[in-house]
């Protein structure tokens, strides 16, 4: 019994005290809700609740949805599912932030505004009404200048006139597709009326030289215009939070855009036998290590035969293939453990966002399968970026994966994240401290 009490007393008091001081500083600055925490160095319920609130704010601040849909329609379903998961997670995290006691100080307001912005972006990107708004804005973006549809001798400039008429006709056909309760609909109707007036001005011979008169009021399209929905409309019901022990889904790397042509080339290479691809890879490498065929060939071999992958083979992956493999944890875990350990050093020397993403994914897969080798894995991370990589590494592990790691390694990870240079590092530090309290 006494041994259990002694073991329980080994909670990292310095880390907890530093965390409590950090949380209280954010409360005093109005960035977290009150009241202040008692700086006891013990991980009590109030501290856990407050750090969960900070984690929720940081996660919402980091959530991002790319504004453009993928160029390949075959990728739309998966991309929409990824965006919807990001939006649902942000809404779920919003439930961990308490409502303000008074409107004078509202720490929740930035997070709420961020979730609302994500919801509007998702609506614009994927929902039919939002796509109609985007299409209509594109059609109305090119304005007709006064007198620009006439030639110098007064004849019609037929190419420009036909193009302007075609855009106006398409805009009038798209407008009924905009939902009646779309907030931007009244402004779009006004712009469509102005586009009609500009078309008339473009056909007037003296419009370019005379002061422009106010645009005549034209009849709006025969569609009922209900009152605009206020911008501050309440959010849909917040979805249930994801299980605490589950690892977060691998994020789509920033700056990584799927390449349909590259994916098609990869499928063609996968059909070839491994011997043929190995010969092609040797030929491409002999021509030049930077030959454009080296990356796709190496990626194809790793994709179809991960059990036979070596650090040298994976080192030949280009940035696109590194991003792909870093998001495919099931295939990465089939790479032999010894090869993954050797790969850590190769990727650390290589550098770059793609290599670091694969490095973090490789380290996480090793820790998940071989927790006894945790110290060797952590020491293999490059020194200059060890803090940021440690945050990425911890984020890829579920709570159960973290709890099976040695206690001294968790303390080492906490010390590396102590500087908390970014919101993600602060969030993972708070998570580590919370899990250490459960050991």
Image (tube, rainbow, N blue to C red):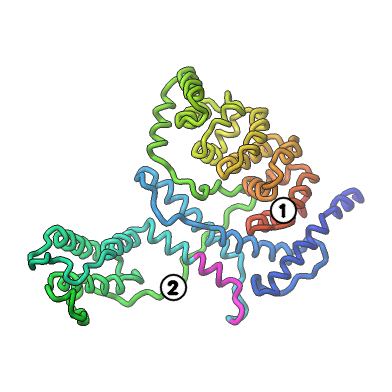
What residue does disc 2 label? Answer: 233
Q: In this view of the protein, which residue sits in the foreground, 285 or 60?
A: 285
* Image coords of residue 377 (percent x, y): 71, 38
Highlighted magenta segment, given as a residue range: 104-115
Label 1 element class: loop
Can residue 211 be spotted in the picture?
A: yes
Q: Residue at x 66, y 72 (%)?
A: 33
Give the left or right position of residue 404, taking residue 185 as reference.
right
Q: Residue at x 57, y 38 (%)?
A: 329
Residue 316, compared with residue 254, is above or below; it is: above
What residue does disc 1 label? Answer: 417
Label 2 element class: loop
Residue 107, compared with residue 267, is above or below; it is: below
Residue 409, compared with residue 428, is above or below; it is: above
* Image coords of residue 102 (percent x, y): 61, 81
Q: Residue at x 49, y 29 (%)?
A: 294
């Amino acid at each position: 019994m006494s041994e259990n009490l002694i073991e329980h007393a080994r909670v990292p008091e310095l880390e907890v005290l530093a965390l409590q001081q950090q949380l209280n500083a954010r409360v005093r600055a109005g960035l977290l809700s009150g009241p202040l925490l008692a700086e006891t160095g013990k991980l009590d319920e109030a501290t856990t609740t407050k750090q969960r609130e900070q984690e929720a704010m940081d996660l919402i601040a980091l959530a991002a949805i790319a504004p453009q849909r993928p160029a390949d329609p075959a990728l739309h379903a998966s991309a929409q599912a990824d965006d919807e998961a990001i939006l649902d997670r942000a809404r779920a995290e919003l439930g961990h932030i308490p409502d303000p006691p008074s409107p004078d100080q509202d720490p929740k307001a930035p997070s709420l505004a961020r979730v609302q912005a994500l919801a509007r972006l998702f609506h614009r990107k994927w929902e039919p009404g939002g796509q109609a708004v985007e299409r209509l804005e594109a059609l109305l973006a090119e304005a007709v200048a006064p007198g620009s549809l006439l030639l110098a001798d007064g004849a019609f400039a037929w190419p420009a006139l036909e193009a302007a008429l075609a855009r106006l006709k398409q805009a009038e056909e798209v407008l009924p597709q905009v939902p009646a309760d779309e907030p931007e609909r009244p402004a779009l109707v006004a712009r469509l009326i102005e586009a009609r007036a500009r078309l008339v001005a473009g056909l007037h011979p003296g419009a370019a030289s005379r002061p422009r008169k106010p645009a005549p009021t034209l009849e709006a399209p025969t569609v009922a215009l209900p009152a605009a929905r206020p911008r501050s409309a309440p959010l849909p019901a917040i979805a249930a939070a994801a299980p605490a022990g589950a690892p977060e889904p691998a994020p789509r790397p920033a700056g990584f855009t799927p390449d349909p042509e590259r994916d098609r080339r990869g499928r063609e290479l996968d059909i070839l036998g491994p011997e043929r691809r190995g010969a092609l890879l040797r030929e491409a490498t002999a021509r030049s290590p930077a030959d454009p065929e080296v990356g796709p060939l190496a990626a194809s071999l790793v994709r179809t035969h991960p059990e036979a992958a070596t650090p040298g083979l994976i080192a030949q992956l280009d940035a696109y293939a590194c991003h792909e493999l870093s998001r495919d944890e099931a295939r990465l875990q089939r790479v032999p453990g010894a090869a993954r350990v050797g790969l850590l050093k190769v990727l650390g020397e290589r550098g770059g966002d793609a290599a670091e993403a694969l490095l973090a994914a490789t380290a996480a897969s090793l820790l998940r399968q071989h927790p006894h080798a945790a110290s060797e894995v952590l020491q293999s991370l490059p020194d200059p970026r060890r803090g940021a990589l440690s945050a990425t590494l911890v984020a890829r592990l579920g709570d159960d994966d973290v709890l099976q790691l040695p206690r001294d390694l968790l303390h080492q990870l906490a010390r590396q994240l102590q500087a908390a240079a970014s919101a993600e590092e602060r969030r993972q530090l708070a998570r580590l401290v919370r899990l250490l309290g459960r050991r």
